[in-house]
Amino acid sequence: MSDKQLSSDELAVWQRLQTVTESLRREVGRGLRADADLSESEFTVLAHVVTAGGSIRAGECARSIGWDSSRLAHQLGRLERRGLVDRTTDATDARSSVVSLTEAGRAAHRRAVGPHLRAAQRWFAAALAPHQLQDLDLALRALESHVQHLSQEGPSS
Amino acid sequence: MSDKQLSSDELAVWQRLQTVTESLRREVGRGLRADADLSESEFTVLAHVVTAGGSIRAGECARSIGWDSSRLAHQLGRLERRGLVDRTTDATDARSSVVSLTEAGRAAHRRAVGPHLRAAQRWFAAALAPHQLQDLDLALRALESHVQHLSQEGPSS
DNA sequence: TCGTTATATCTGACATGTCAGATAAACAGT
DNA sequence: ACTGTTTATCTGACATGTCAGATATAACGA
């Protein structure tokens, strides 16, 4: 389609995006592990189940997080082994499974949400002036819709 | 230190940053695997060795990438098994090991660099207007120095 | 109903990332 | 030289992520 080449400025920003977000993910994940003994991925799943009201079909959960079903299935297996969620087959569609929080899962989420918000404040929000936050949001929205658009159609150019 | 709480706007941008960068990483990585049979991590290591002139001490490589030494050691093990790099002990310091590219490693890097740049153009740069790129860069620089500053001193607030 | 296709989820194999701790060499002070 | 400490790297255990393919159910058409 377009044969424009990447400028060195663009490359530098692209690389900075990678390294900075990777550091952030690592540091915040480390804190969550230390504060609440949950990985970022575990917390994400628990949070989405909580938001859905305590139980949700697996496929819907995967879609809302943005994961493929395999990744979610593995994570659910680990969460189930840890006793934080239950899986039961859906009454109206026996292919589907319904994920629900155990009491321990609810407790783990409660324990994690405060530290998680504080970590986001400390590592992320504290670094940015209001206009920078706004600019960042606009750029991310543009990227978000671009990526969504691209990944729907052809995998290659 | 500061007890400011995260606003819902800030939380939304934080979450968007996570999801968008994760999608980007996944899609670009998928393309690199398809185009050049290299993972993003493998390519990163090869590229840093190339930039260093074809060989580099392991610790310096880890620092330049921003990885801890364990992560690099595992990746080097895999790259060595694939025949893309060699490891030899440094002549001047027997604790240290020197990583160098094999001919296959050089070839793999050559094969990957074009597709990788095109992927960055297609998935990232194509989505952003020049001023958005600039704004994003400024926000990322602010985050970068903030993270670097924080991770040097105390691990907790 | 039967056969085919689509959908929802799971599984196994393997690559990757993180953590704690092992190993070994260099260094510093005595 | 001896001892303790620091530095550079590696290893093993385990959690995570990705891919291909298995399994089972639902949905649809002949």
Image: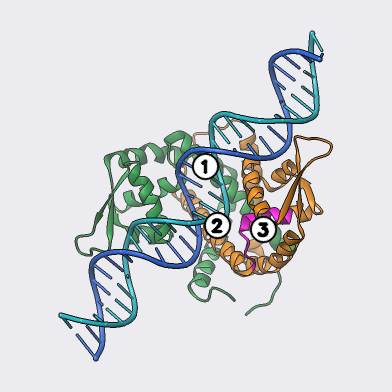
Chain colours: A green, B orange, C cyan, D blue
Q: CA distance from mark 3 to mark 1?
A: 25 Å
Q: CA distance from mark 2 to mark 1?
A: 15 Å
Q: Residues within 10 Å of mark 3 (few under 14, many from 20)?
A: many
Circles 3, 1 touching at the beta carbon (< 8 Å): no
Q: Residue furthest right?
A: B92
Which one is closest to the eye, mark 2 or mark 3?
3
Q: Main secondary structure of the magenta part?
A: helix
Q: Which element type, helix, strand or loop, lies under badge 1?
A: helix
| Disc with the residue nearer the chain's start (2 vs 3) | 2
- Which of the two residues, B97 or B10, is positioned nearer the viewer here? B97
Residue under numbered circle 2: B21
Taking B82 as reference, is A154 above or below it? below
Q: Which element type, helix, strand or loop, lies under badge 3?
A: helix
Q: Is residue A93 left or right of residue B86?
A: left
Asked if badge 2 and badge 1 are on a common chain, one would say: no
Q: In percent of the image, x 71 and y 43: which residue is there?
A: B63
Taking C28 as reference, is B22 above or below it? below
Residue under numbered circle 1: A28
Q: Where does the magenta region start and end?
A: B36-48
Q: Is residue B40 magenta?
A: yes
Q: Is residue A28 left or right of residue B142?
A: left
- Which of the two residues, B139 or B19, is positioned nearer the viewer here? B19
